[in-house]
Amino acid sequence: EAQKPARRIRALDPDVVNKIAAGEIIVAPVHALKELVENAVDAGSTSLEILVKDGGLKMLQITDNGGGIEKEDLEILCVRHTTSKISTFEDLSSIATYGFRGEALASISHIAHLTVTTKTKDSPLAWRAHYLDGKLVPAKPGQSAEPKGAAGRQGTQITVEDLFFNVPTRRRAFRSYADEFNKIIDMAGRYAIHCKGVGFTCKKAGEASNALSVQVQATVIDRIRQIHGSNVANELIELSVSDDRWGFSANGYVTNANYHIKKTTLLLFINHRSVESTTMKKALEQTYSAFLPKGGHPFIYLSLEIDPARVDVNVHPTKREVHFLNEEEVIQAICQKIESELATVDTSRTFMTQT
Ligand code: ADP
Ligand code: MG
């Protein structure tokens, strides 16, 4: 049988590499939204307005009132691995801000049209810049790519248009704008509950009313009430548990035994970043199963702060999965605390009905 001739090895075109990397980080519009929200919160914003068109595929716009971006930084804003948040590998283990790799804006610019309008406190003008493939580009062909002065308030507005316009297979994978919008609203709601001191709105382009609205001064319970309703908000137990041995503290609100619903709602934040954890969810459901009717599930908002030296955030570009030391012990400590809280409420209720 004839042997195949050796194939020559060639470097992939950098543009292809960048598109692959971008597609790993931004799988759906909601992933772009999460990065943009985290950036806005990192910038010290107290107001965050989100505007969505066609499930975020046509347009995703976030307007914040944070510190803004210096005009001089606009040139490299969308270059991969440019960040104002860390400078050494060691910094990775002590990050206090959400983002850390300077990849989000770069990625988005490779799979969408990105427009940034930003003004710092000391700048007399706002500056507007357009990006594609990591670089500044003109607003219209023939114009200069240089940022242009504009009127504007302090803060940053980022507009992402035509997401995946140059990745047709990915673009075609979306069947329903409504599904993508629901994912966006869900994520915005998570951050709106977690980010005390920040006002949030989220709205579909062309609609008069907001799909989500939380006032800047709202308490956490108010926020939960706004987004998940009074049925949940009226049945919450405040939770607070920490253990120096495992280097963590956890705070949050969880529903008591009076409340149950078909599916668990778990809003989990680890070091102020929304994450998923099936291990945590299973353990929590197990804990509640002793207190709720069969098939009933809780609502849980949990903010877990873990000594950054114990967290490995560098597992995957999406950073959706976070691992930390003594995961089992930490989860157990949280579940035990919830169990004792539920038991206390339960006995007081039994006691009350008996008298
Ligand atoms: P990272 O957040 O990991 O640094 P990003 O690509 O998300 O990477 O952002 C790159 C940089 O752009 C940030 O470090 C920050 O300096 C700046 N930036 C992005 N969004 C904003 C914003 N809304 N307000 C102020 N600065 C921002
Ligand atoms: Mg970021």
Image (tube, rainbow, N blue to C red):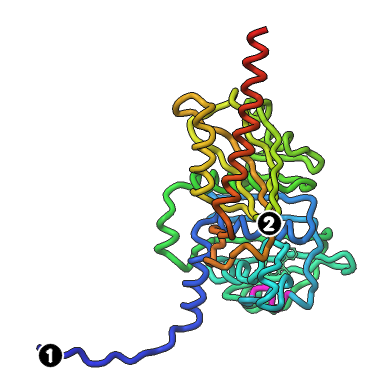
Type of amino acid at the residue the image marks with label 2:
Gly
Q: At x 65% / y 55%, what residue is drawn?
A: 246
| Nearer to us in this view, 257 or 16 | 257
- Residue drawn 60% across the image and 34% down it: 339
Marking on residue 2: 1
When the figure is inspected, residue 320 is found, relative to residue 54, above or below; the finding is below
Between 279 and 216, the one lying in front of the other is 279
From which residue to which does the magenta span run?
A: 74-78
Residue 297 rendering spot, x and y as whole percentages: 52, 32
Few, some or many residues within 10 Å of mark 1 (<14, 14–19, 20+): few
Disc number placed over residue 64 in the picture, else none:
none
> Relative to residue 160, is residue 259 depicted above or below?
above
Query: Looking at numbered disc 1 in the image, what kind of residue is underneath it?
Result: Ala
Residue at 63%, 71% in the rendered image:
101
Q: Residue 61: horizontal and vertical position, in percent?
A: 65, 55
Residue 271 visible? The answer is no
What secondary structure predominates along the stretch shown in magenta? helix
The disc, 2 or 1, on the residue closer to the chain's N-terminal end is 1
Question: In the image, which disc is placed on residue 247?
Answer: 2
The picture places residue 183, in percent across and down from the top left corner, at: 54, 47
Task: State yes or no: residue 114 in magenta.
Answer: no
Above/below status of 12 relative to 54: below
Magenta stretch containing residue 76, yes or no?
yes
Looking at the image, residue 121 lies above or below residue 245 = below
Residue 280 seen in the figure: yes
Give the number of marks.
2
Which residue is depicted at the point 53% across and 36% down? 287
Residue furthest top as drawn: 355
Crowd class of label 2 (few under 14; some 14 to 19; many from 20; radius 10 Å): some
| Left or right, 217 with reference to 179 | right
